[in-house]
Amino acid sequence: MIPSHNFKKSIRSALENPHLQNAFEECTTRRTQRVIDSLSQLGDPDSFRYLAQKIREYSIGHLDELLRQLADNLESLGAQVHWAQDARQAREIILDIARRHDCHLCIKSKSMTSEEIELTPTLTAAGIETVETDLGEFILQLDDDRPSHIITPMIHKSRQEVAALFQNKLRSQYTEEPAELTAIARQHLREKFRQADLGIVGVNFAVAQTGSLVVVENEGNARLTISRPPVLIGLMGMEKVIPSPRDLAVLLKLLVRSAVGLPLTSYTNIITGPRKPGELDGPQHLYLVILDNRRSEILAGPYRDLLHCLRCGACLNVCPVYRKIGGHAYGSVYPGPIGIAITPLLDATDRQTEFLPELCSLCGACLDRCPARIDLPHFLIQHRRDLITHRRSSLLYKLILTAWTWFYRSPARYRFSQKWLRRLLLPLARRGWVRHLPPPGFHWTAVRDLPLPKKQLFRDLWKKTDGRLS
Amino acid sequence: MNTQKEVFLQHIRSALLSHKTAPAPLPTDQEYQSARLVNNQADLTDRFIRLAREAKMEVYPVHSPAQLRDELSLLIQRLHLKTILLADDPLLASLAIQTALQTIPHLEIISPSIDSDTLVSAAFTSSAAISAAALALAETGSLVLTAAPYHPRLLSVAPPVHICILPASRLLPDLLDLLNPENFATSHLTLVSSPSKTADIEMTLVYGAHGPITEHLFLLE
């Protein structure tokens, strides 16, 4: 369908911004090369991907048992588990915990799930100062901005913007040097770490067999978040559970390489229960909030395999659409291939999201890179089919597609359609491309060019040369 | 509370039942083992040192406790460290680290195991900390730090310099050797694979985001 005006506007502004184009290109190209290099250390990365797919299939197929086992183990370790049906419940649970412990300063380490439930405004409104501690997220929070990538949240910001922001908001000396900017943020946040009485951390994996929560990171902010505050809340979508430690071993080997092109991140944290008697730090009170938020609906339907995703972000870096428009243009919490597949399912109230599956050229690069071998193109086609068959597309659009289908289903009709299409479009074409169609087709050419059908069809060429190239 | 849990799990149960096909089984033991990248026969020390150095950890191989004490003292003086948090680790005690440090002029040595408040203020103000690694991983060149009464979590993450002592006998080959239920008995385990780092600003790599700016490792063979 036709993207709404808003989409077009945000996509166009991304395309017209040379800094953004540079940053996306730089980030995704460099990262992709590093990912390829580090995957080659696995010998046969595909055998790892099959293994990872098996583990994820099993985990999702036994989700109820594994979550029960996880919760039982966490409770026997002295932690408390909360079950949130939707975003509102999750916010209430977390706010309630914060109030019960009389918390005033909350340090947060990167969590896409907390973005999904829009947690920070709730805490702030309740008078709890809430500070993002991942450097990228901290800068975005200072600037009242949103993440544009699952792993590197602020690739859209330039060093000059950060420099001006720090000078303005932190009253620091103006500098554009990333090392100095990082040092300024470090200094500012150390006091927050020191005084925080509540920590909130996104959970990357939960190990059912041992009741462990796993948090991977590079900066040390998650380590400080799970070490310092006396109250710690882990937040996770219900799909993050895996059976046992050895599953973690296999998935870490593959996922970290796929995400950042390294064998492991700087820190891999494994939390198994609150602090033990005699220990001087670590959380005295440990909570885990498990979020459904429509995931059980996804589980019941044809999109179930999307729950295998562990948010490594690899599909973003290889997606030709993401690489051009960046994360913000999507207008959703999760951008890129996984974002356009999962957002219409997580957030069915917002009509904007149903167009997201159109932001894809079905090139299949994401499928080749996904560590869990999720067939994203398949699900994006499924979304488009849903859109046409049961809802919300105009009669005219349906009519055009039905006619198209009819023509393309028989060789004779196909040949006929190509011949006539060429004759019809020839007056509109310049150098083999149609750039502007008259109504009702003008929406279509507003965002893309239409290739003129060739005089000689591929099938005729094939017949003539018997499949040879020349 | 409990009903919330049951309702939540019931939703999942019925969602799973709406699918006709049974879920695939977990990989076999043999398949898990196929994910092994390093075996017991490999030269673990060499691999560990190479990978740790690639990740910007300073590695100093030493061959005796006496050499360790000497080189440690030199490092502390070279870095002009003023205050050091020293973990009350049995290994460090057996290596007589504290005795060696006491001979360094103008160096304040702090024991972290006094009480919570002292620990927090010392961790955020000391110039360095010394601890022992519980284990280490040759596959990735990573240290394994575990929480214990004598090894608080903050000790190895808050000060800007972390110095770690690792006996070579504690090296494990592969993640599959480390990640098993027995090793998850500790309340907190961290694999440290490099100094703290970030590349959030224009993809420029910077060390020392929130954790240690430098990691120094004495590998005692």
Image (cartoon, grey):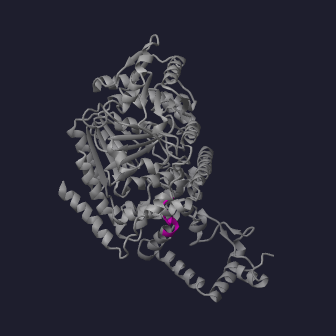
Q: Quadrant of residue A466?
A: bottom right
Residue at 35% x, 40% y: name it.
B188
Residue at 29% x, 54% y: name it.
A70
Q: Give the answer, above or below, for where B89 lies relative to B180.
A: above
Question: Farthest residue toward the bottom?
Answer: A412
Q: Nearer the viewer, residue B60 or B195?
A: B60
Q: Quadrant of the C terminus of chain A?
A: bottom right
Q: Quadrant of residue A190?
A: top left
Q: State the extent of the magenta-drawn residues as a range.
A: A371-378
How many labels, in total?
0
Q: Could you say where residue A153 lies in the image, as x and y percent from the top left?
A: 49, 45
Q: Nearer the viewer, residue A358 or A346?
A: A346
Q: Could you say where residue A135 lies in the image, as x and y percent from the top left?
A: 47, 37
Question: Farthest residue toward the right?
Answer: A470
Q: Quadrant of residue A239?
A: bottom left
Can residue B30 be seen in the rendering of this structure? yes
